């Protein structure tokens, strides 16, 4: 997803959800367990650890404060909110910002919203679906579907 903001031409090139991130030799990031949605056997479900990786590009450069939050479907209740972190994008350069979350509980299946704030303003958001494995084909958990 690519999003533009008038704040110093800051651009969010992409956001990736994954189980873990490691910094390797040569300042390279290794992302483990990249996902788009979460399929579980039952809810509520607690995720031990996951990360939100944001890759920023900036034409004019500058220092910014980033915060990631996950909200329920109607965006009224936060499930989890990261601590604000500073990142700096040099003129014409890029920066990666990683927010780690531990022991996050999703109380029900459905849509949640991953929001990225920059300098206390909403910059981007996208949905995260929590799906119960038994309900993927419309079959309630614990029941099987008979095909004739």
Image (cartoon, rainbow, N blue to C red):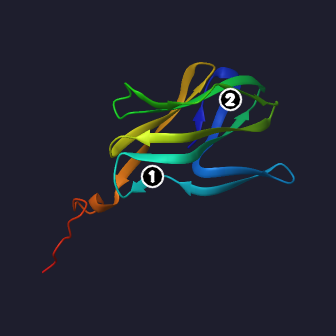
Q: Is residue 141 above or below residue 65?
A: below
Quick one: quadrant of the N terminus? top right
Q: Residues within 10 Å of mark 1 (few under 14, many from 20)?
A: few
Q: Is residue 86 above or below residue 104?
A: above
- Taking the view exactly as shown, the residue that stands out farthest to the top is 120
What SS does tag 1 mark? loop
Choose top left, top right, bottom left or bottom right for residue 113.
top left
Badge number at residue 10: 2
Quick one: quadrant of the C terminus? bottom left
Choose top left, top right, bottom left or bottom right for residue 40.
bottom left
Residue 77, position as x, y percentages in the image: 39, 26
* In front of the other: 103 or 36: 103
8 relative position to 69: left or right: right
140 relative position to 101: left or right: left
Residue 125, position as x, y percentages in the image: 49, 34
Q: Residues within 10 Å of mark 2 (few under 14, many from 20)?
A: many
Choose top left, top right, bottom left or bottom right for residue 30.
bottom right
Badge number at residue 37: 1
Q: Is residue 136 above or below residue 130?
A: below
112 relative position to 136: left or right: right
Residue 127, position as x, y percentages in the image: 43, 41
What residue is drawn where x is 57% and y is 46%? Answer: 50
- First-in-chain label (2 vs 1): 2
Badge number at residue 62: none
What residue is drawn where x is 49% and y is 40%? Answer: 104
What SS does tag 2 mark? strand
Task: Tell me the distance, in whole angstroms, between the alpha carbons under discs 2 and 1.
Answer: 27 Å
* In front of the other: 66 or 40: 40
Q: Is residue 138 above or below residue 98?
A: below
């Amino acid at each position: 997803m690519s999003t533009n903001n008038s704040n110093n031409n800051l651009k969010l090139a992409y956001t990736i959800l994954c189980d873990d991130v490691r910094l390797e030799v040569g300042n390279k990031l290794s992302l483990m367990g990249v996902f788009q949605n979460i399929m579980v056997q039952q809810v509520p479900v607690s995720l031990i650890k996951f990360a939100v990786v944001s890759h920023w590009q900036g034409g004019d450069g500058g220092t910014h404060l980033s915060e990631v939050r996950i909200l329920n479907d109607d965006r009224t209740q936060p499930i989890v909110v990261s601590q604000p972190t500073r990142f700096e994008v040099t003129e014409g350069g890029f920066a990666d910002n990683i927010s780690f979350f531990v022991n996050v509980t999703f109380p029900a299946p459905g849509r949640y919203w991953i929001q990225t704030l920059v300098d206390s303003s909403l910059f981007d958001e996208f949905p995260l679906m929590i799906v119960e494995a038994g309900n993927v084909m419309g079959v309630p958990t614990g029941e099987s579907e008979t095909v004739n």
